[in-house]
Image (cartoon, rainbow, N blue to C red):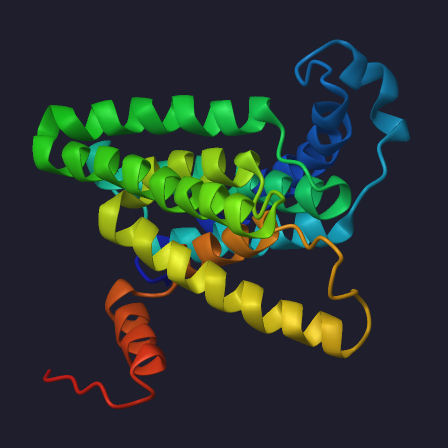
Amino acid sequence: MYINDVHILSYVGVGILAAIIGWFINWVNLRLPEEKKVFSKEIFKQYKKVKINGWIILCMIFSYIALVYFCGIHKGFYENLTLIKFGILIPMLLCAFVIDYRLQIIPNRLNLTMFEIGLLITFIYGISNINIAKEMLLGMVVGAGIFLLITLVGGLIAGKEAMGFGDVKLMGALGLYFGLYGIIVVSLIAFILGAIISIVLIATKKKKSDEYIPFGPFIVMAAMIVIFVPFNILVQVLSKFFTLGKAKWID
């Protein structure tokens, strides 16, 4: 039996792999903030002590199955590159979401790993199409540049850090995965989500108006949306949002 040209057993296998990675993410979230090695012998000694977050495992399973459904599984390596790069990125995004939500930090090691893998993927794209590699490098510069500017200007105006440098590094790394136009869309969606959710949290008194709200989770949610929602649909929705529904599209 096939679903979107992918055998159902492939979905089962991907789901099992996602569950294993989901458990591993719980281990990573425990080790990274403490600046301890993730890949070590201690994983076999302390695996029972790891507090399992079922939501992370469910998110991994759903994300991987959805990724295979939308991207498919092809015979050639380059044809599977989108599947591979986002398959690697999603677990790291979930780590960033959980750690920043809990501790208001995004570990440098996590950002650096995203960046290193992103550069490798950019190089691989460049072998077949140099223009794609250029766009991804531009995405890195623009992604980091937008948030660095906000951080510096916000700091001058407000007299305090408006956004953490971990967010700047995260956006720079993500630019290598989404490219120039993709990272701009990620930025816009993240700001919209951040504004709406922050207003709701303050209105419901779950957060105080002067209380710090980490922005990393909004970046992660925006990135996940861009991964799974067709780009043209996102552009249309954003255009209507910023023009108050006055934008018109010709199919």
**Residue 106 occupies quadrant:** top right
**Relative to 36, residue 71 above or below:** below
Q: Nearer the viewer, residue 212 or 124?
A: 212
**Relative to 170, residue 187 above or below:** below
**Relative to 127, residue 5 above or below:** below
Q: Quadrant of the C terminus?
A: bottom left
Say how many tags the image has. Answer: 0
Q: Position of residue 104 (x, y in %)?
A: 70, 42
Answer with left or right where residue 163 lies relative to residue 201.
left
Q: Nearer the viewer, residue 53 or 221?
A: 221
Answer with left or right where residue 187 lies relative to residue 30.
left
**Relative to 247, residue 56 above or below:** above
Q: Is residue 16 visible?
A: no
Answer with left or right where residue 239 lies relative to residue 25.
left
Q: Quadrant of the N terminus?
A: bottom left
Residue at (29% x, 52% y) in the render: 182
Q: Is residue 101 visible?
A: yes
Residue at (32% x, 24% y) in the render: 119
Q: Nearer the viewer, residue 207 or 106?
A: 207
Residue at (45% x, 47% y) in the render: 153
Q: Nearer the viewer, residue 189 or 156?
A: 156
**Residue 99 occupies quadrant:** top right
Q: Position of residue 19 (x, y in %)?
A: 65, 43
Q: Position of residue 109 (x, y in %)?
A: 58, 22
Residue at (56% x, 27% y) in the render: 110
Q: Residue furthest right?
A: 49
Q: Residue furthest bottom?
A: 246
Q: Position of residue 205 (x, y in %)?
A: 82, 73
Answer with left or right where residue 87 lies relative to residue 94.
left
